[in-house]
């Protein structure tokens, strides 16, 4: 089922998500819905709090347009190693219509459980490394705009406020 993606400044996006304790049918259903919602959007990643579920689950698919889908479902993901620097443009399904360059690590090693409860390890670089960092941030209530310099963040906030005012309260 395609779920509604919460958007900035929804306070639900600022909450920290709790670790998944048992991988049961309801967790599997959330993961399935997240993948469906991500592909429908379309986007390359989605974290559970973006659909209002505060559990540590992320889905990512960075396969190209002409490649076969390559879905990653990561439960309780942890970055166990990171190195290098990246400064790439990012967007977010929860911050529609806005993109900005963000400082990240260029390479990360991520450990997580899959839907069968098996521990998986990913050694990621390029877009996948950035996607892991971006989605894991969501589980801690952090949006990519929180990484911007104070000046850029301020401009973003003013722009968001202006957009909210021009779209709201009109007949
Ligand atoms: Ni995002």
Image (cartoon, rainbow, N blue to C red):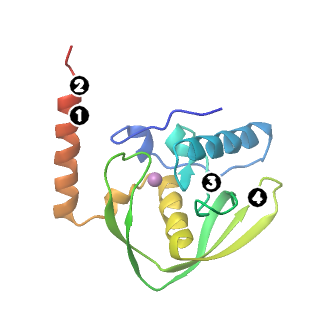
Please tell me the numbered disc located at residue 114: 4
Residue assigned mark 1:
164
Which residue does the image show at 64% across and 41% down from the upper left? 36
Contact, mark 4 vs mark 1 (Cβ under 8 Å): no
Numbered disc in front, either 4 or 1: 1
Q: Earlier in the sequence, mark 4 or mark 1?
A: 4
In the rendered image, the quadrant that contains the C terminus is top left
- Mark carried by residue 168: 2
Residue at the extreme front: 66
Q: CA distance from mark 1 to mark 3?
A: 29 Å
Tell me if 132 is positioned left or right of 112 in this view: left
Foreground: 41 or 3?
41
Query: How far is the residue under mark 3 from the one under mark 2?
Result: 32 Å
Residue 86, horizontal then vertical, whole percent: 41, 79
Residues at discs 2 and 1 in contact (Cβ within 8 Å): yes
Q: Position of residue 48 (x, y in %)?
A: 57, 45
The disc placed on residue 59 is 3
Q: Quadrant of residue 78?
A: bottom right
Give whichever of discs 4 and 2 has the lower sequence position.
Answer: 4
């Amino acid at each position: 089922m395609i779920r509604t993606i919460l958007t900035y400044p929804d306070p639900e996006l600022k909450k920290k998500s709790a670790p998944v304790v048992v991988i049961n049918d309801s967790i599997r259903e959330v993961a399935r819905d997240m993948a469906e919602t991500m592909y429908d959007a379309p986007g390359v990643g989605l974290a559970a709090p973006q659909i209002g579920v505060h559990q540590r689950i992320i889905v990512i698919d960075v396969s190209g347009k002409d490649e076969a889908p390559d879905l990653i479902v990561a439960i309780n993901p942890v970055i166990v190693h990171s190195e290098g620097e990246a400064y790439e443009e990012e967007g977010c399904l929860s911050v529609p219509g806005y993109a900005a360059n963000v400082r990240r690590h260029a390479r990360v090693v991520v450990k997580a459980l899959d839907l069968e409860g098996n521990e998986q390890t990913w050694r990621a670089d390029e877009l996948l490394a950035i996607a892991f960092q971006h989605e894991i941030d969501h589980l801690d209530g952090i949006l990519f705009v929180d990484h911007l310099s104070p000046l850029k963040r301020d401009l973003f906030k003013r722009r968001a406020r202006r957009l909210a005012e021009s779209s709201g309260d009109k007949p």
